[in-house]
Each structure stands twice: as structure tokens, then as C-alpha cells.
Image (cartoon, rainbow, N blue to C red):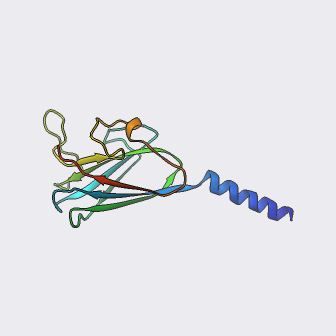
Amino acid sequence: MKALIIFTISIIFSTTIFSQGKITINISGLESNKGQVVVVLYKNGQKFGNFEEYYKKQIHKPIVGKKAFIYIDNLPKGEYSFVVFHDENSDGELEKAWYGMPKEGITNSGNHMKRPNFDNTKFTITGNDQVFNLNIKYL
């Protein structure tokens, strides 16, 4: 009986402490099937917006029917944010005009056009799966 109680407590503890989540990102509004969609994921606000330093970067191919679907799993609990862009020339980089505005379609986990920062785009992974339905915007 004592072993059963210890086993039950260890299972509850491990699923609570080590639970991980998955995000599904459904992208629509792409202007073409050309190129790829890039997702840059940030955790706890670290280096938000820096496309060179991030938590995880995932490149998804192909774009079909001007839509893309991205799945990122095994995410530990915490606060996250992401930026998604339509990498039309498949170079893995967000193309910008000389004045800094994106030349390629872009959106974020807040799905808004305000200047994104971690606080206005963050979401929390608690072990549950989350779905984001986003529309790429071209500026």
C-alpha cells in the first residue's frame, strides 16, 4: 500500500512539474505558395524580436493553397511568444526595406499590427495544447 501511494504521488508530481504543451499555428492570408513560412519562438521575453537569438526556429515547407500549418511540441511550461513570416525567397531571413519595415508578410502570436513586443504577444504554456489561427499581413 505504501508503495502504491508513493508511486501515485510520483506520477502526479512528474506530470505537474514536467508537463509540456504543443502549439498549432494555422497561417492564412499568404499571397502565394512561393517560398516557406518561418516561425521564430521566444521564451520568457529573452531577446524578443532578435532573429539571431531565440528559443527555437522552425522552418515549414511547403505552403499549400496559400496556407501553412505548423506544429511545435514538447514545450516546457512558461511564457512564450512567436513571430511568423512568409519567407518568399526561402533564405530563412525576414527581408526588410532600408527604413526597417518588413518586405515579406508577417504576423505574431498576438495577431495584431501594433509594434510587437513580448508583453503584447505572449501566451502561457501550462501543459495544454493551444491553437493559433493567424492571418499574415503584408505592409
Q: Is residue 89 left or right of residue 136?
A: left
Q: Nearer the viewer, residue 59 or 134?
A: 134
Q: Nearer the viewer, residue 35 or 127?
A: 127
Q: Residue furthest right?
A: 1
Q: Residue furthest left?
A: 98
User: Percent x, y for residue 26?
Assistant: 33, 59
| Residue drawn at (18%, 45%) of the image | 95
User: Percent x, y for residue 30?
Assistant: 20, 56
Q: Is residue 92 left or right of residue 126?
A: left
Above or below for 45 versus 134: above
Q: Is residue 116 left or right of residue 43?
A: left
| Residue drawn at (18%, 35%) of the image | 100
User: Percent x, y for residue 32?
Assistant: 16, 60
Quadrant in the picture for the N terminus: bottom right
Above or below for 63 versus 48: below
Quadrant in the picture for the C terminus: top left
User: Percent x, y for residue 73?
Assistant: 46, 59
Q: Residue furthest top?
A: 99
| Residue drawn at (36%, 47%) of the image | 109
| Residue drawn at (64%, 53%) of the image | 16
Q: Quadrant of residue 127?
A: bottom right
